[in-house]
Image (cartoon, grey):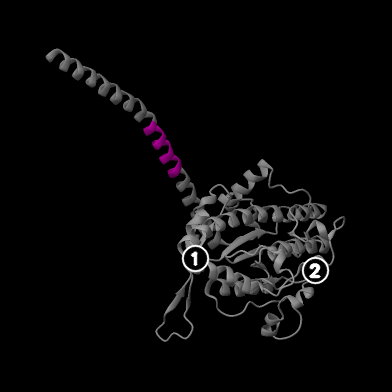
Amino acid sequence: PAFPLDYHSPRRPRAGSTNNSKDISHVWELGGNLSVPELISIPLRRGLDKSVVVVVVDTGRPENVVGSLKKWLDLVRDRIDVEMREFEAKEPARAKAMFEEAERRFGVDHPDFSSVNISPVPIVIVANKYDKLKEEDSAGRRCLMQALRFVAHGIGATLVFASTRDKQSRDLFRSVARQSLFDQGPVASAAVEGGSEQQQQNAKWKKAANFGDSAPLAVKPGCDTFEAILAAMPKGTVKSDFVGHNGIGPRATETWAKSLEVFYGRSTLDDKKEEAKLELDDEGENDGGGGKANSYPEPAVDEARAAANLRLTQYKKEVQRRQEIAAAAIDVEKPRERERKSRKSSDRDKSSGERRRRK
C-alpha cells in the first residue's frame, strides 16, 4: 500500500436492486511490517461485528511462511481480544451474537470443536503466489499445506491459496473474496471431490480427508479435521506435538516451522539483513531495475507502484519532519518554562518584600 494503512472501497451491484443501488465494502490494507501494530485497531473499531480480517502470506518464500503467519495472527488476535472486551462492555448482545455466529460457522458438532480457539471476527488466510509453490518439491509443498491447514483450522479461519498466474486458484480467491466482502454466494472448493458445488459445501468436515496437495485449496471454517491434517505427520514428530487432550499444543507452530526447515532451510525472518531487504522490497526496491518485479514487467502496475512508493517516501519524510519539529519545540519550551517559573518566583518574592515594607 501507498501508506502504512491504505483504504479502498470496492462496490458491487446490489442483488435484486431495480434502481442501480450498489453494496460497498470498506477495505483497510495494512502493509509493510509490524512496526505500527496499533493501526489494526482503526478498521476494527469502525464495525467490529461486520469485520473480516485477511492475512496474506508469501508462499514464494516458503521458509518464512509459518513464522510470518504466526506473528501476524498473534498480533491480530491480541487486537481482536482488546476490541472485543470494549465491545462486550458497550454492546453485550451483539458481542454474544458474534461468538454464537463464529461457533455456528465452525459447527458445534465438529469433532475438534473443543480443541480449537475460534476467532469471533472471521479470519481469512491467503497463501499467495501459489504458482511458485506448485513448482516446489511435492513433499515440501505437502508439508507446507498441512501446516497452513493446521493453523487455519485451529482458529476457525478460512484458508485459500491464490495466484494471479493460476486460473484455478485465482477463481477460488475471487469466490472467497466475494463472500467475505459482500456475503454473496457459497465459496467454491476445488479440494473436495465429486458432487455439485452446493453438495461440496454441504459435505463440510466429513470430506476433509479428500484435501490433497495437487490442487489449490479453499477450506472454509469447520471443513477440515486434525485427524485428516495429521494423517501423514512430518518425519520425527508424533500427534501429541501438535494436538492433545487439552487442545492445540503450545509449540505446535514451532514444530511445523522446524519440519519445514528440512525442505526450505532456516527461516530468515529474524535475520536483520533479510528484514531490511524485505522492507526495501515493500518500499519499491524492485520497481526500478533488476528486481523481482521486473521478471514480470507490467508498465501500468510499475507506474502505479512507483507513484505509491513516492507517496510513501514523502509521507515518511513528513512524519519525520513533524517529529523533529515537535522534539525541537519541546527542547525550546523547557528553558522557556524554567524562565517563566523563575520570573514568577522572583515576582512573588518582590511582592512579598513590598508588602513587608508597607507594613
Instruction: Single out the residue that lies furthest toward the top.
Output: 357
The residue wearing badge 2 is: 227
Q: Which mark is residue 347?
A: none
Can residue 355 be seen at all in this image of the molecule? yes
Q: Quadrant of residue 52?
A: bottom right
Q: CA distance from mark 1 to mark 2?
A: 36 Å
Q: Nearer the viewer, residue 216 or 158?
A: 158
Q: Which mark is residue 92?
A: 1
Could you tell me residue 22's position as x and y percent? 44, 77
Comes first in the chain, label 1 or label 2: 1
The relative height of residue 339 versus residue 255 in the rendered view (above or below) is above
Element class at badge 1: helix
Residue displayed at 56% across by 47% down: 35
Q: Main secondary structure of the magenta part?
A: helix
Could you tell me residue 343's position as x and y percent? 26, 22
Residue displayed at 67% across by 45% down: 274
**Pointer 2 local density, CA inside 10 Å: few below 14, some 14–19, many at least 20:** some
The relative height of residue 335 versus residue 315 in the rendered view (above or below) is above
Hey, what amino acid is under mark 1? Pro
Part of the protein shown in magenta:
318-330
Hey, what amino acid is under mark 2? Glu
